Image (tube, coloured by chain):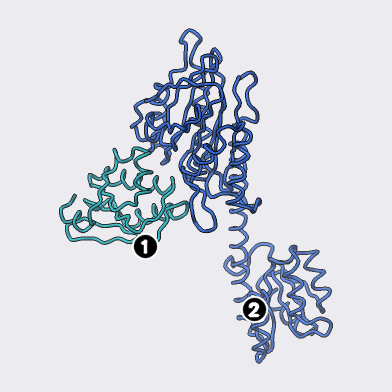
Chain colours: A blue, B cyan
Amino acid sequence: MRSEVFEMNRILIVDDDRSVRILLRSILKKKGYETSECEDGVSAVEFCVKSNPDIVLLDLLMPDMHGLDVLKQLKENTQTASIPVIVLTGSTDQEDKLSALRSGAVDYISKPFVSEEVTLRVGTQLRIHELISSLQSAVRELENDLEAAGRIQRALVPSEVPQGIGVDINWIYMPSSSVGGDIFDIIPLEHSRYLVYVLDVSGHGINAALVSVMVHRFIEDFRSSISPEDGVFPLADFMKMLDASFLFERFETYMTASFVILDTMNGEVEVSNAGNPHPLLLQQGVIQVLDSENNGAIGFGIVEGITRKYRIHEGSKLLLFTDGIIDVRDSNGSRIGEGTVIDLLKSEKDSALGELFSRFRGLLKKHLPDTSRSFEDDITLVGIQF
Amino acid sequence: MFNLREDKQGAAIVYFAEGSRMTGKESERFRYWCDEKEISKFSCVVVDCENLEFIDSMGIASLIRLYRIIMESGGKLLITRLSQEIREILTTLRLDSLLEIRSDDPSSLIMGNG
């Protein structure tokens, strides 16, 4: 019957008493299970490592090795740790039953056996084990998909500054472990002009990663559609089109972004912000919070295409970032906040961009000293020094 | 974490447990919870954010989804008692132009139905 016997159910019976092994074998064979037998603990451990049975019925009182020691060895070995073990005990061995359950046994069967109890307990544990295995396999598949999505996303961000750009650019790009929706790029346009953007798709996981990849593609296509005769990249129109193309109802997600067109030859930038933290411009020792060109988030049909141009002096620094960095919290729960970013920029106003970014990296490390962990949200910070 | 209080006129107040944070998985749960409660059947829903300490982008997306569900069924959504920090986030996103944000006590909003 399907409910009692699953495919490939191989049961190992471990007992020094031959009559017990014969009895269990007979009960289980009747139900169609495949059985193997070991008469001592050492051979049982060896068998499990070699053959990985689906379940082990383990006697506790054996002369060579106590069943609890066998159980301990099985649970300590990664190859055998997941094999469910049902212990066989005398009906009065209450402490042994508890010790076995504490040591990782999934159930116990008291001697003398009632055949129906044996098949019911074995059947139940096999079903549970199968469900756990299929759940683990689904989680592994999902993790693999997420990892692949993360790899695709990371492949789209630049690995180096475009040659001949004429400004210094530095960045910190730290996607969170759960794959977020941050992305950034530096795209050459026409006549010494470059489009630089940082963009954050709401949420995490495959949906956010795929939308960020689609947006990246959209931006590339938009740029390619502008012929040399058309002239410059129309940032305001682009913002409106991006908003209209990625409406919330399509993916149940929205975006925030900062877009900047650098005109490195004429010392000018055109900025448009869409719900991201306001870009910061450090110019002649003064920090300007660029808050007048905010369009609101992309995806709600509210973007008006507001942009603003700024004359840039040599040595000025421009910072673009998503909200990840300002929402980082230390162990006491206190947030980095926009103020800390501004203070750090102010304190490094005369430093080279590389030094400023070393300070930012130090700040992040201070908030997450364990390098094997990642922040809750993606962190993207791009700095430009003219 | 989320609770619903209905009134006899077909309105409801959604409120959060103290110290709530609407992030990642909680936002997912909020979405399922709204569906389970058949939130679209209410003519007016007031989201009382007094106990909402933090909201991330997924949390905001789940609020927007709630807004859309209620609008599509011809209802009304009011959000009230936001913390200063969350209010600023919504303003930066310009969602204050989309969502009806109040500061009144939720019971008074429900009585006057906005």
Question: Who is closer to the viewer here, A305 or A249?
Answer: A305
| Label 2 crowd (10 A; few <14 / some 14-19 / many >=20) | some
Furthest toward the left, the residue is B112
Q: Are marks 2 and 1 on the same chain?
A: no
- Residue drawn at the location 78% of the way across and 64% of the way down: A51
Please, what is the three-letter code of the amino acid marked with disc 2? Leu
Task: Indicate the chain on which mark 2 is placed.
Answer: A
Question: Who is closer to the viewer here, A233 or A383?
Answer: A383
Question: Which label is found at residue B17?
Answer: 1
Q: Secondary structure at mark 2?
A: helix
- Residue drawn at the location 83% of the way across and 73% of the way down: A43
- Where residue A96 appears, as percent x and y from the top left, is 68, 85
Look at mark 2 in the image and give the residue it sits on: A101
- Where residue A307 appears, as percent x and y from the top left, is 40, 24
Quadrant assignment for the N terminus of chain B: bottom left
Up-down: is A103 above or below A326?
below
For residue A192, what is the image quadrant? top right
Is A318 displayed left or right of A5 in the figure? left
| Label 1 crowd (10 A; few <14 / some 14-19 / many >=20) | few
Up-down: is A275 above or below A127?
above
Please, what is the three-letter code of the amino acid marked with disc 1? Ala
**How many numbered dots are placed on residues in this image?**
2
- Residue drawn at the location 82% of the way across and 79% of the way down: A40
In whole angstroms, how far apart are the C-alphas of marks 2 and 1? 37 Å
Up-down: is A80 above or below A367?
below
Which mark's residue is nearer the viewer, 2 or 1? 1
